[in-house]
Amino acid sequence: MKRIALFLSFFSVTAAFASPTNLSPQQIAQINADVEAVLHRTGTPGTVVAIAEQGRIIYTSAYGLGDRERQLPATVGTNFEIGSITKQFTSAAILQLQEAGKLHIDDKLAEYLPDAPHAKEVTLRQLLSHTSGVVDYLDGPDIEEAATKPATFEQLMTRIADRPLDFAPGSRFSYSNSGYILLGRVIEVVSHQSYQRYVQTQLLDVAGMTHTFTIADEKQLSNMAVGYWRKEGKITPSATISSSFGWSAGFLVSTVSDLQKWNVALQGGKIVSPADYVLMSTPVSTTQQGESDYGLGLAVDSIDEQPYVGHDGGSFGFTTGNEYFLKQKVQIIAFTNSGSLSPDAAVAVTTAIFEDLYPEIAAAAASPAAGENPAVTRNVRGAFAAMQAGSDSSPYVSAEVNEKMKEGAAKELSGQFALLGRPTAFVFKGERSVNGKKRLVYVIHFGPGVVLQFLPRMGSDGKVGGWMFE
């Protein structure tokens, strides 16, 4: 869903919604049914969820299998790779070092890593907020093989060393894992400790996290989930990213209860100051695109027009979600052992749980906006159905779009959306201007928790002439 602007302090938001403290048997039954539906739809072997209210876990449950081959069930204590949720820890470490007077986030990277790519052009703040323009070291056709091998910082930098910036620093937002690898090395240079040692002593120990480790520890963990991915239409055990390859961009392994300890410590001022937590959770502005959807290590997003701050994570065999809903003062965490992002199982689980907790909000969000043109909606639905089917010729799209479909877009789109299945609802939500061009906004539902925002651009002939997805 569209990430929305948010300038509210975590400490000043008042709840205006019914408390979920005492979940009814009906709510629990609905959560269980919807989570199981997500697992079935996405082919996910297992998931563990937690719901916390004002810092206290009020519900936690495990579903399915942590290890399909050995038929071992997932438990509430199962460890999962948490992927990019690691970025919260890296960002907090940088802000701690700023609070200690050892660096400043508006300094150029060259102040600390003079030989790093584009070090004289980008600031630490831009690396934290994904507005630096530094390309992603995870890009490339060799990534599935390369990421399984140990790598030093210098070796990771060779993947981007000769590549130009994607855009002028500060002008746009583009998610780049490279920025967080660079920040990991800054932490080492400034603190005179290894990144792992700093995270352990200054973050994990402070938060009381005794069940959080790194990918390198997985073989020693008795309750470690096995990761899975979809290859050639089959769900199989995934490869494992090397701990040193994911590193400060995504190498942590945790449990849902341990991650909730982190949430409490971070939000409660034990890790960084309250002012710096607000900084982390406030969207950064760019010169060309305006306000972004990201702060410093935390995304700012919404479900059913309800704002949350948090982060998703993904690795070869895992997806995770960690979302704090500000108006409801509720945290929802979901860890899954599915690496498929179409759809993202963890996001689907957290969305389904939120809507089960607040069905009135979900119902209101599913109501169409005024001004819908049924003929236009018919064309939009037809265009999306053609994308799912992989059709390279559709009467619902322009001749230019059909030409692109013939050139390979049809196969790519089908690969992204066919697994979502038949839409259960196609809801018109109005219009939006994107880069000066009018786009219609539709929210497509595919069953519990699986939602896609579709922004088609209509041509003068009433056919779809382009689109965006969010």
Image (cartoon, rainbow, N blue to C red):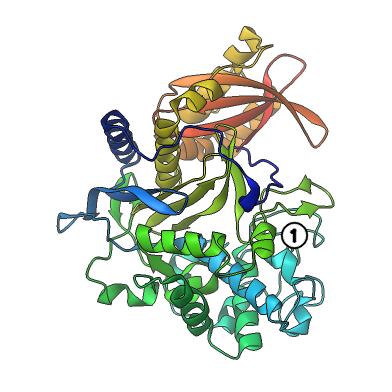
* Residue 105 screen position, x and y as percent: 74, 72
Which residue was labeled with disc 1?
A: 166
Above-or-below relation of 312 to 443: below
Above-or-below relation of 284 to 79: above
The quarter of the picture where the C terminus appears is top right
- What residue do we see at 45% from left, 54% from top? 55
Examine the rendering and report whether any part of residue 142 can be seen: no
60 vs 125, nearest the viewer: 60
Q: Which quadrant of the structure image shows residue 81? A: bottom left
Horizontal relation, residue 461 to residue 202: left or right: right
Above-or-below relation of 166 to 43: below
Horizontal relation, residue 116 to residue 64: left or right: right
Disc 1 crowd rating (10 Å Cα; few below 14, some 14-19, many 20+) is some
Horizontal relation, residue 171 to residue 197: left or right: right
Q: Residue furthest top?
A: 374
- What residue do we see at 82% from left, 60% from top? 168
Examine the rendering and report whether any part of residue 331 can be seen: yes
* Residue 19 screen position, x and y as percent: 44, 36
- What residue do we see at 64% from left, 16% from top? 369
The quarter of the picture where the N terminus appears is top right
* Residue 133 screen position, x and y as percent: 74, 62
Horizontal relation, residue 69 to residue 421: left or right: left
356 vs 454, nearest the viewer: 356
Say how many tags the image has: 1
Q: Amino acid at mark 1?
A: Asp
* Residue 302 screen position, x and y as percent: 58, 39
Q: Which quadrant of the structure image shows residue 295? A: bottom right
Q: Secondary structure at mark 1?
A: loop
